[in-house]
């Protein structure tokens, strides 16, 4: 059974170009002479199988930092984090993409990197190309893609996985209307297949549709943790 246990989780970032007076003192601390932003300030929580957690809170409250810490992208500077289960990250659409390769080449490379055979990777390429709906642009370098095109490609690639724990930033729900209509069924399957989902979002409609627990962050601390019934999409 997938699970996440966090205790006293702290994440800090060094601040290089700062004007201490322009920042709230509570968010900034000095450590060994350096000025640090305290992004997560001693978080403790447990997330178990079946939970679909929305991380909410104002800009800069620590939602993305927490997602990235759960994904293993950031290391906590203090506290304990235990993640049981395979993680699938839909956090940064451009993560792991080579800007100079085409969309098609990036998909192939990701398949091979994940240990798929040449044949399996080609099958993944065909499915992702079809789902992304990028047409001829799939054979252009991704550095020329628009933000929406990046999301289409990243979404199509990410939903090929079947993780126990799905970590998602709302960026991934920001495709155009036509794409998101098609993407919704696929997303529902992905969420249903995952034991745990953690989603960072500002959109309360998304929270109501996908989540059965809301954790609110403010200035790097949890200020509310509420469970509620699941409505539709991920039942
Ligand atoms: N790479 C970084 N370097 C320095 N500071 C950072 C970095 N990432 C985040 N921070 C700081 O950590 C704090 C939390 O940021 P975070 O991006 O986690 O907030 P958020 O809740 O996701 O915000 P938003 O709703 O705007 O996406 C902010 O003060 C931010 O400036």
Image: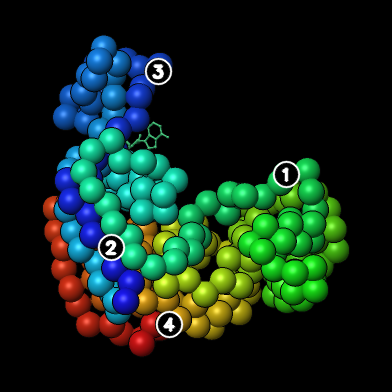
- Left or right of 134 in this view: 3: left
- Tell me if residue 211 comes above or below residue 229 in the rendering: above
How far across and how far down the image is residue 225, in percent? 16, 63
Distance between the alpha carbons at the discs numbered 4 and 1: 32 Å
- Measured Cα–Cα span from mark 3 to mark 2: 32 Å
Rounded to the nearest angstrom, the CA distance separating label 2 from label 1 is 33 Å
Residue 203 falls in image quadrant: bottom left
Q: At x 76% / y 65%, what residue is drawn?
A: 134
Q: Quadrant of the C terminus?
A: bottom left
Q: Earlier in the sequence, mark 4 or mark 2?
A: 2
Query: Which labelled disc corresponds to residue 192?
Result: 4
Label 4 C-beta lies within 8 Å of the nearest ligand 1 atom: no
Q: Position of residue 187 (x, y in %)?
A: 51, 76
Q: Secondary structure at mark 3?
A: loop
Q: Nearer the viewer, mark 3 or mark 2?
A: 2
The residue under the point 19% across, 40% down is: 41
Q: Is residue 6 visible?
A: yes
Location of residue 11 by image quarter: top left
Q: Secondary structure at mark 2?
A: strand
**Tag 1's secondary structure?**
loop
């Amino acid at each position: 059974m997938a699970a996440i246990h966090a205790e006293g989780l702290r994440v800090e970032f060094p601040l290089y170009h700062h004007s201490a007076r322009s920042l709230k003192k509570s968010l900034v601390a000095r450590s060994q002479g350096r000025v640090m932003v305290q992004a997560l300030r001693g978080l403790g929580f447990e997330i178990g199988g079946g939970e679909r957690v929305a991380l909410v809170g104002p800009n800069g409250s620590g939602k993305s930092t927490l997602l990235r810490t759960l994904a293993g992208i950031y290391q906590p500077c203090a506290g304990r984090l235990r993640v049981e289960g395979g993680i699938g990250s839909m956090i940064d659409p451009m993560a792991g993409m080579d800007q100079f390769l085409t969309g098609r080449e990036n998909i192939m490379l990701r398949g091979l990197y994940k240990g798929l055979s040449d044949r399996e990777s080609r099958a993944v390429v065909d499915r992702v190309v079809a789902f992304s709906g990028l047409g001829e642009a799939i054979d252009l370098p991704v550095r020329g893609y628009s933000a929406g095109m990046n999301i289409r490609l990243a979404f199509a690639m990410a939903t090929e996985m079947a993780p126990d724990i799905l970590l998602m930033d709302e960026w991934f729900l920001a495709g155009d209307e036509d794409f998101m209509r098609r993407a919704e069924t696929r997303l529902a399957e992905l969420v249903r297949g995952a034991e745990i989902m953690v989603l960072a979002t500002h959109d309360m409609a998304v929270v109501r549709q996908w989540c059965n627990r809301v954790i609110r962050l403010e200035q790097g601390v949890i200020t509310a943790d509420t469970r509620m019934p699941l409505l539709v999409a991920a039942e």
